[in-house]
Amino acid sequence: MPATGKPVGQDPKRLLKRAEFLAVRRGEKRRGRFFLVEVLDRGDGGVPRVGYTVTKKVGNAVVRNRVRRRLKEAVRVHAADDMVPGNDYVIVGRDDALRAPFGQLKAELSRRLRGTR
């Protein structure tokens, strides 16, 4: 691990377009206490892509952005190496993700990305 604390593995790309998010909804759903992970195998061996969604049920814009930032940081520092090349991931945050200890959030995200219970 370099001095920045960031893993050496390849960073996932971002899903940005609505059509890409909707396409991932056809894939597998992995439910967790803090978030829902939707996974779609694209069939190519390319870099994994990830997108983040937090619905208005979670709270106002400030709360939703805090949940999204915590999920992005958990992927960046811990769970990016657990992503399979050629897959797209959409992480749908829940309000429990804001109150959970960060270590527990990282471990749960890593477990869900690997597909283990």
Image (cartoon, rainbow, N blue to C red):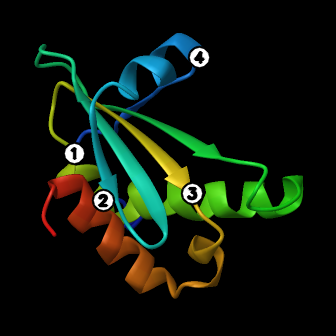
Mark 3 and 1 residues: CB-CB less than 8 Å, in contact? no
Callout 2: helix, strand or loop?
Answer: helix
Q: Quadrant of the C terminus?
A: bottom left
The residue that disc 1 covers is: 83
Kind of residue indicated by mark 2 = Ala
In the image, farthest residue toward the bottom: 101
Amino acid type at circle 1 is Met
**Residue 93 badge:** 3
Q: Which residue is mark 2?
A: 79
Between the C-alphas of marks 4 and 1, the distance is: 21 Å
Q: Is residue 75 left or right of residue 99?
A: left
Work out whether 55 lies above or below 86: below
105 or 32: nearer the viewer: 32
Q: CA distance from mark 3 to mark 1?
A: 18 Å
Query: Which callout, 2 or 3, points at the residue further toward the start of the chain?
Result: 2
Mark closer to the observer (4, 1) = 4
Q: Residue at x 41, y 84 (%)?
A: 103
Looking at the rendered image, the quarter that the N terminus falls into is bottom left
Q: Check disc 4 and report the residue beneath it.
A: 18
Q: Position of residue 28 (x, y in %)?
A: 25, 38
Q: Please provide percent x and percent y for residue 78.
A: 32, 65
Q: Secondary structure at mark 3?
A: strand
N-term-proximal mark, 2 vs 4 = 4
The residue under label 4 is which amino acid type?
Arg
Secondary structure type for disc 1: loop
Secondary structure beneath dot 4 equals helix
